[in-house]
Image: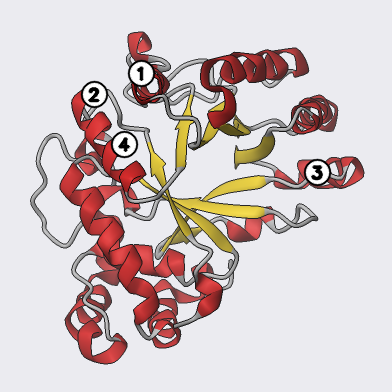
Amino acid sequence: MEKEKTDRTLILGTALWGWSVPKQECFRLLDFFYDNGFREIDTATNYPINSRPEDFRLAEDILQEWVCAHKVRDIQLIVKVGSLSNDGSPENNLTKSFLLMSHDFYDGKFGSNLKTIMIHWDNRESGEKVRETLEALQLIRERGTGIGLSGIRFPKVYAGIASELGLSFTIQLKHNLSRSAFHRYRVIPGKHRYVVYGINMGGIGLSDSYSQTSSAVLRKVDLRQLDPFRTKIEKIIKTAPDRFKLRIETVYDVNLAFAYTSPDVSGIIIGPSRLEQLSDTIRFFHLLPSGDLSGLRLALEEIAGSNVKNAI
């Protein structure tokens, strides 16, 4: 077993809650996730991402209902703030006053369960405006809440100001066999915690048949993105028991293993739609340390190619 990998954890994502995941299934997912010892949950003001204005903040409301019903005080909630709609637009409010108000709101809503406030989707190039945002995050950190970044278009604009203010972040970034954003955030100096998402590659699989409620269909994912990797992924799945002492069954398993064996990854966001998916993910996550991770890592890097491998 590679002991350095044991600090990885799973983080329950909520982007589809209230959309393809009904509220009662969300509660079942939360119960199972919590009962299996996991505590980190990721949400955002614009979840679910279904473009229905009436569902803005719905995912966090479902979570709040569960927290209150069970009187839970020890989850570690990551909340991404700034988005003003759930229609996928980049419209944000990242002013100091709005971010501090958002922190007050979520502190009141979740109390001790609130772990991290992240800013969500920033396409600005103005250092002056980014400074105001980072000064707000500095104040939030001084209040005792962790701070983070997600979806930053120009990380270099953040680099010097963050260094000057002495800020360290939890950084969320997309990371799978076809795409990795690690290299974009390396420009921000400091010791950061890296949390990855997108390990399901938009919900695509080896089957060419998808239901109308699948994540891939709902999110209009380009199903062809798997084509360059299909043969190699199929080979990994077929030979894994002998080569790596692991039973790997799906594209999702392959990408979860890729994230788990990637340097610096601390948390892996998962977005199960059904309890069975969550159970399978947790089972596989616990099996990973027993396999030949060094050999598996080399094989996965070969599939990912230089663009992704060099980005890590």
Amino acid marked by disc 4: Leu
- Relative height, residue 278 to residue 301 (above, below): above
- Which circle's residue, 4 or 2, is located before the other in the chain? 2
* Location of mark 4 (residue): 30
The N terminus sits in image quarter: bottom left
Element carrying mark 4: helix
Query: Which corner quadrant of the image does residue 27 belong to?
Result: top left
Q: Residues within 10 Å of mark 2 (few under 14, many from 20)?
A: some
Q: Are marks 2 and 3 in contact (CB under 8 Å)?
A: no
Q: Residues within 10 Å of mark 4 (few under 14, many from 20)?
A: many
- Which circle's residue, 1 or 3, is located before the other in the chain? 1
- Residue, far front: 71
Q: CA distance from mark 2 to mark 1?
A: 10 Å
* Location of mark 2 (residue): 23
- Which circle's residue, 1 or 4, is located before the other in the chain? 4
Q: CA distance from mark 4 to mark 2?
A: 11 Å
Element carrying mark 2: helix
Instruction: Look at 47% across and 72% down and name the residue there.
Output: 261
Q: Is residue 26 left or right of residue 188?
A: left
* Location of mark 3 (residue): 167
